[in-house]
């Protein structure tokens, strides 16, 4: 398929959404899902069930997918951040290692927050990340916000290069809290980009 077009995700995309969410989160999602697994469920089972929900931030309703030859090649998970964010409420019950991430997310009120953007490894270098980012911009404008926000580990050099090439600028940072589920040390970066 040449020049694939992103489409809204459906519950049938839940497996791909869970796999790509875990890829984007570099293993943190699967660790969190494993904490909620019951009765022989795997972490992926929990992730798939969450992706199928019609509510919550990780839901197919907040996702767009890009297909290549009829198969999901990549996904974007994004949504409008509230204009007013109660940081204390957002931090309630959050594991210590996720506090820096949640704090950064709270520093981008009113933006279209790109929670996850991922392309399967065998579909990379085809421009799909840029196509999904264009979809984020389209959705942001549809929701009447002029700013995109995204977080990235500074150690994820490929993603940092992509976002800088697409015009994102540094907005804030937090030190990564090392945890069994994290692969990076150093800083987590909040990047933003104004669109029109």
Image (cartoon, rainbow, N blue to C red):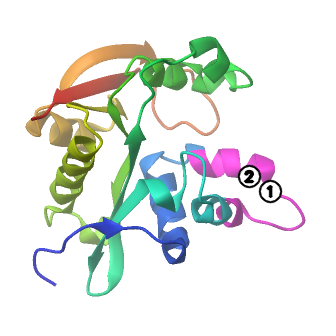
- Residue that badge 2 annotates: 34
Residue depicted at x 23% and y 44%:
158
Residue depicted at x 65% and y 64%:
44
Q: Is residue 183 left or right of residue 63?
A: right
- Which x, y percent locates residue 114? 35, 41
- Which x, y percent locates residue 86? 57, 15
- Residue that badge 1 annotates: 37
Using the rendered image of the protein, determine whether residue 36 is visible from the camera's viewpoint.
Answer: yes
- Residue 47 is labelled as none
Rate crowding at label 1 as few (under 14), some (14 to 19) or many (20 or more) other CA atoms within 10 Å: some
**Would you say residue 43 sits in the magenta stretch?**
yes
Q: Circle 1 sits in a helix, a strand or a loop, which is it?
A: loop
Using the rendered image of the protein, determine whether residue 120 is visible from the camera's viewpoint.
Answer: no
- Which x, y percent locates residue 150? 33, 34
Specify the quadrant of the image occupied by residue 165.
Answer: top left
**Would you say residue 153 sits in the magenta stretch?**
no
How much space separates mark 2 and mark 1, taking CA atoms?
Answer: 5 Å
Q: Circle 2 sits in a helix, a strand or a loop, which is it?
A: helix
User: In the rendered view of the protein, which quadrant contains the C terminus?
Assistant: top left
Circle 2/circle 1 CB separation < 8 Å:
yes
Q: Magenta region: which residues?
A: 29-46
- Which x, y percent locates residue 130? 16, 54
Up-down relation of residue 85 to residue 29 (above or below) = above
- The residue closer to the viewer here, 168 or 185, is 168
Residue depicted at x 41% and y 58%:
63
């Amino acid at each position: 398929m040449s020049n694939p077009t992103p489409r809204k995700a459906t519950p049938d995309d839940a497996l791909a959404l869970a796999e790509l969410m875990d890829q984007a989160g570099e293993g943190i999602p699967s660790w969190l899902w494993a904490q909620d697994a019951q009765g022989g469920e795997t972490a992926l089972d929990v992730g798939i069930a969450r992706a199928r929900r019609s509510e919550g931030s990780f839901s197919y309703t907040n996702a767009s997918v890009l297909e290549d030859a009829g198969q999901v090649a990549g996904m974007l998970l994004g949504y409008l951040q509230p204009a007013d964010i109660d940081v204390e409420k957002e931090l309630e019950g959050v594991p210590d290692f996720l506090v820096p991430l949640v704090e950064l997310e709270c520093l981008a009120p009113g933006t279209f927050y790109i929670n996850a953007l991922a392309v399967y490894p065998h579909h990379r270098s085809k421009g799909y990340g840029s196509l999904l980012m264009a979809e984020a911009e389209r959705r942001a404008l549809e929701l009447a916000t002029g700013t995109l926000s995204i977080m990235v580990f500074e150690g994820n050099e490929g993603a940092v290069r992509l976002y800088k090439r697409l015009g994102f600028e540094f907005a804030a940072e937090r030190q990564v809290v090392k945890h069994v589920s994290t692969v990076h040390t150093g800083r987590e970066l909040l990047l933003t980009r104004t669109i029109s």
